[in-house]
Amino acid sequence: MTRLRHIATAVLLLAAGPAVAADCAPLRHDRLEYTVCIVDPAGEDLRLFRAMPDGTVLGTFDRVNVLLAEEGRELALAMNAGMFHPDRSPVGLYVENGEEQHRAVASAGPGNFGLLPNGILCLGRDRAAVIETRAYLAAPPACDYATQSGPMLVIGGELHPAFLPDGTSRFIRNGVGVRPDGALVLAISEEPVTFHEFARLFRDALGTPDALYLDGKVSRLYVPALGRHDIGLPLGPILGVVEPQTR
């Protein structure tokens, strides 16, 4: 069974070495508050969810659990996972169960998604990767699940060049990165933060050489073991750690 623990200190959570399960803890960085979850892709059932088999958009963590109940499973951890149109269809690449449902978009455009470079979260057999979009298209890896969002927060250990230390745009934000040991790192801010502050969290505190912005304003986290169940407007893609039902 997935083990979700609230750790008093972030030192244990962020220590080097492979993650053994999915652990969530609060983390304070540069006087700002975050919740960070570490997931071992080799030991967990990681999936993306967007719609029912008949095409009905799921949109909420509760509806994902209704879908999973049919196989006797449930969410242990979930987070919104990529930008979407008003009809909640993906803006960029979306792959579910190895099937590409929407193609990648590599061109610059309006909004955060089009602030290149953007990137792709790829979930494969026992592994996860965050890949800049054009690098992905140049040598597409095998992804059982994939979602595109943008901008990249950290690229090869460097912050996105458009992020300014004195930026004034602040929102609740969430993102994802992968540590050198292969652990998947999910983070959500507990207060409004700038892009520069959020990117430095991934680079300096979480140690992820590549990290991807998932969204802002709509950012939400679901961790039932911690009593966390954020609610709000319906979502597009949802990233979840799945476990056998416990009730």
Image: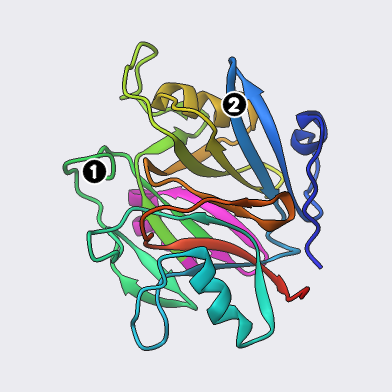
Q: From the viewer's perspective, is 203 left or right of 149?
A: right
Name which residue type carries label 2.
Glu
Quarter the N terminus occupies: bottom right
Could you tell me which residue is drawn at 29 percent across and 69 percent down? 102
Q: Mark 1 Cα within 10 Å, few/some/many (few <14, many 20+)?
A: some
The disc at residue 114 is: 1
Could you tell me which residue is drawn at 76 percent across and 31 percent down? 10
Quarter the C terminus occupies: bottom right
Find out whether residue 95 is within the magenta segment.
no
Q: Secondary structure at mark 1?
A: loop
Percent from the top left, x then y, of residue 238?
Answer: 47, 62
* Range of residues picked out in magenta: 123-145
* Closest to the observer, 20 or 161: 20
The disc, 2 or 1, on the residue closer to the chain's N-terminal end is 2
According to the image, label 2 marks what residue?
33
| Position above or below: 52 against 215 | below
* Closest to the observer, 212 or 190: 190
Residue 227 appears in the rendering: yes
Q: Quadrant of residue 192?
A: top left
Q: From the viewer's perspective, is 51 left or right of 85?
A: right
Q: Quadrant of residue 77?
A: bottom right
Name which residue type carries label 1.
Gly
In this view, which residue lies farthest toward the top? 166
Q: Mark 2 Cα within 10 Å, few/some/many (few <14, many 20+)?
A: some
* Cα–Cα span, label 2 and label 1: 28 Å
| Position above or below: 179 against 68 | above
| Position above or below: 106 against 170 | below
Q: Secondary structure at mark 2?
A: strand
- How many numbered dots are placed on residues in this image? 2
* Closest to the observer, 45 or 117: 45
Percent from the top left, x then y, of residue 78?
Answer: 57, 58
